[in-house]
Amino acid sequence: MAGHDIFRLSDVSVHYGRRAALEGITAQIPCGALVALVGPNGAGKSTLLRSLLGWLPLSRGEIRLGDEHPRHLHPRLAYLPQRLEIDWDFPISVRGVVSQGRWPALGLLGRFNAAERERVDRALEELDLTALADEQIRRLSGGQQQRMFLARAIAQGADIFLLDEPFNGLDLAASAELLHLFQRWLGQGRTVIAAVHDLPLARAHFSHALLLDTRLVAAGPTAEALSEANIDLAYHRRMPVLGARP
Ligand code: ADP
């Protein structure tokens, strides 16, 4: 059962050149959970997401889901890039993007038959995008853009969603809608792992958190992992030394 799998990170380090972006991370990430990756800018949140996808060579340690290397987990794993990384002027419709979720399964000679079309239609419907299927992607609101990539992931057959700052640039209503969707997925055994810089949002809506500062500061149920003391540690805040002389 997907819901019982666990990502295991054992002593994971990642370097860009000589610079460590992650150092000695040992943690377990439960599946069927809503997991926030939290930490200051440059703490390694994006790097951890890419490592979980199997895209980056680890300089030490290993990552497994069950017994599997992340590279062998397609189509279960899906990645949502930051919205800024996307060329929104590229001429493609919402349905075109969602259909991309089927490409890997089709292979070079595969044909986009009725069953494939049906899968895409169901994904569009699940994310409430049916009415927008033929729109160009640049015409979508921020929230609709996020839902489009989630629909592509659903069409792919993913059940583990890795998202880089999904709430960035969304207004309150769109954020609430996205959170509502994630809560519903939780009940369906789906897993969301998201880099989140909004601490109150992470505390209020995520079941688990990993707090990073190149090293792992804390991991576990959100209330414990994101305690004030841990946040101070990760963000290097120091108590003012009262009465200290200059
Ligand atoms: P976060 O997502 O928490 O802001 P990142 O994972 O993006 O952190 O970055 C962690 C560290 O690695 C930062 O110091 C960043 O400058 C560096 N870094 C990230 N990507 C690259 C890259 N492609 N090449 C070199 N350094 C990088």
Image (tube, helix red, strand yellow):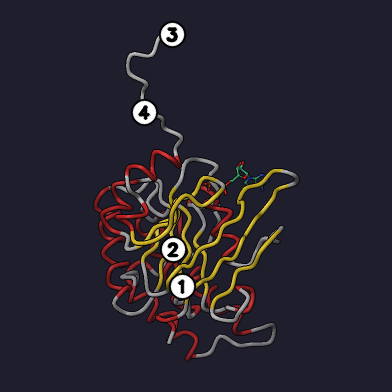
Which mark sits nearer the N-terminus, 2 or 3?
2
The kind of residue on which mark 4 rests is: Met
| Residue 191 image point, x, y percent | 41, 71
Which mark sits nearer the N-terminus, 4 or 3?
4
The residue carrying pointer 4 sits among few (fewer than 14), some (14 to 19) or many (20 or more) residues within 10 Å by Cα, namely few
Q: Which element carries disc 3, helix, strand or loop? A: loop
Cα–Cα span, label 2 and label 1: 8 Å
CB under 8 Å between discs 2 and 1: yes
Q: Which residue is mark 3?
A: 246
Q: Quadrant of residue 49?
A: bottom right
Which mark sits nearer the N-terminus, 1 or 4?
1
The kind of residue on which mark 2 rests is: Ile
Which mark sits nearer the N-terminus, 1 or 3?
1
Q: Nearer the viewer, residue 82 or 7?
A: 7
Cα–Cα span, label 2 and label 3: 45 Å
Q: Residue at x 56, y 47 (%)?
A: 214
Cα–Cα span, label 4 and label 3: 16 Å
Cα–Cα span, label 1 and label 3: 52 Å
Which mark is in front, 1 or 3?
3
Q: Residue at x 60, y 88 (%)?
A: 111
Residue occupying the far right of the picture: 17
Q: Which element carries disc 4, helix, strand or loop? A: loop
Q: Which residue is mark 4?
A: 239
Q: Which residue is mark 2?
A: 193
Cα–Cα span, label 2 and label 4: 31 Å
| Residue 147 image point, x, y percent | 38, 64
